[in-house]
Image (cartoon, rainbow, N blue to C red):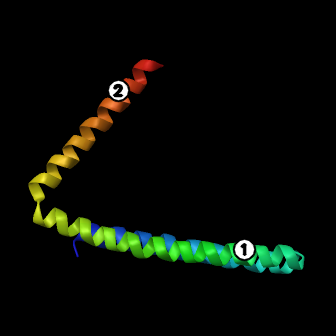
């Protein structure tokens, strides 16, 4: 895995862990302070959000690996795309300043 893909994967993993910890705290607080219907609904939400976060982490890891492989296989095309993206971003920023 390239350094960029590894860094992205590590950052996504850290973000995922933060989300899971926050959801755990949320579940604990709601369980201590809510009635049964609220607690049940919140737990369903938290379970769904946790499953979604896991799915996003898995897909993001796969995308990062694929992107790294594509860059390795086509470095000139990747550099051209990056330059084009920077150029488009610069153009968009310059046009936004003119509108104000």
Q: Secondary structure at mark 1?
A: helix
Q: Residue at x 40, y 19 (%)?
A: 98
Question: Which residue in the structure is indicated by mark 2?
Answer: 94
Front-most of residues 59 and 88: 59
Picture coordinates of residue 12, whole percent (x, y): 43, 70
Above or below, comparing residue 71 to residue 96 in the picture: below
Among all residues in the image, which is located at the extreme right? 35
Q: Which mark is residue 48?
A: none
Q: Quadrant of residue 26?
A: bottom right
Taking 50 as reference, is 85 left or right? left
Nearer the N terminus, badge 1 or badge 2?
1
Residue bearing the label numbered 1: 26
x and y, in percent, of residue 36 in the image: 88, 79
Between the C-alphas of marks 1 and 2, the distance is 43 Å
For the point 27% across and 66% down, the residue is: 4
Q: The N terminus is located in which quarter?
A: bottom left
* Disc 2 element: helix
Question: x%, y% of residue 31?
Answer: 81, 80
Residue 95 found in image quarter: top left
Other residues around mark 1 within 10 Å, as few (<14) / some (14–19) / many (≥20): some
Toward which corner of the image does residue 27 lie, by quadrant?
A: bottom right
């Amino acid at each position: 895995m390239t350094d960029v893909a590894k860094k992205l994967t590590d950052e996504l993993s850290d973000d995922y862990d933060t989300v899971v910890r926050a959801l755990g705290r949320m579940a604990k607080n709601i369980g201590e302070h809510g009635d049964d219907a609220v607690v049940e609904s919140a737990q369903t939400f938290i379970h769904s959000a946790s499953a979604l976060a896991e799915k996003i982490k898995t897909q993001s890891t796969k995308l990062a690996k694929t992107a790294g492989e594509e860059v390795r296989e086509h470095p000139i095309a990747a550099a051209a795309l990056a330059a084009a993206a920077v150029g488009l971003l610069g153009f968009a920023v310059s046009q936004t300043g003119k509108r104000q």
